[in-house]
Image (cartoon, grey):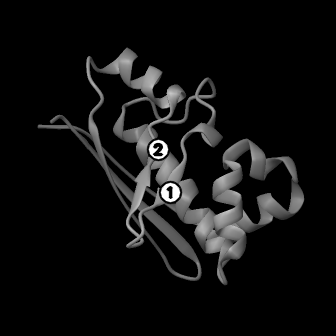
Amino acid sequence: MILGIGIDNVDVERIQKKISKNPDFLSYVFSSVEIEICNRKTKKYESFAARFAAKEAFLKAIGTGIDLSIPLNQIVIHNQSDGKPYIEINDTIRMLFTNLFTFTPKVHISMSHSSTEAFAFVIIESD
């Protein structure tokens, strides 16, 4: 059963400007693992923007939208060995799910980007 759907798009230039103007932006929004992954990419700003969109899509899917009590850097986007993205269900996210659901649901995520925009789509479903 689908419990939530979220979609978001982000302007790559907007994220690039935020990163350039505010050095704290990276650590506020992204985990150290995400920063390392994106900085290794040829198109790092597109990668940061896609992850930002994924975090916003995830928050929309759980029904909160941007909520300042949920640290964005705790919503960690990883990639499987085949490149497929997934959201790490760490203690912060697990507590969030505990408050919203009586179980840990499955989270499906898809991200894409062009040179100017990044997109993400999240589906949350029960087992």
- At mark 2, the secondary structure is loop
| Residue beneath disc 2 | 88
> Is label 2 in contact with label 1 (beta carbons under 8 Å)?
yes
| Residue beneath disc 1 | 78
Q: Is residue 125 left or right of residue 66?
A: left
Q: Quadrant of the C terminus?
A: top left
When the figure is inspected, residue 81 is found, relative to residue 90, above or below; the finding is below
Residue 84 locus on image (x, y percent): 37, 66
Residue 23 locus on image (x, y percent): 88, 53
65 and 29: which one is in front?
29
Residue ID at (40%, 40%): 60
Q: Is residue 61 left or right of residue 78?
A: left
Residue 88 locus on image (x, y percent): 47, 44
Amino acid identity at mark 1: His
Amino acid identity at mark 2: Glu
Residue 30, disc? none
Residue ID at (55%, 58%): 51
- At mark 1, the secondary structure is strand
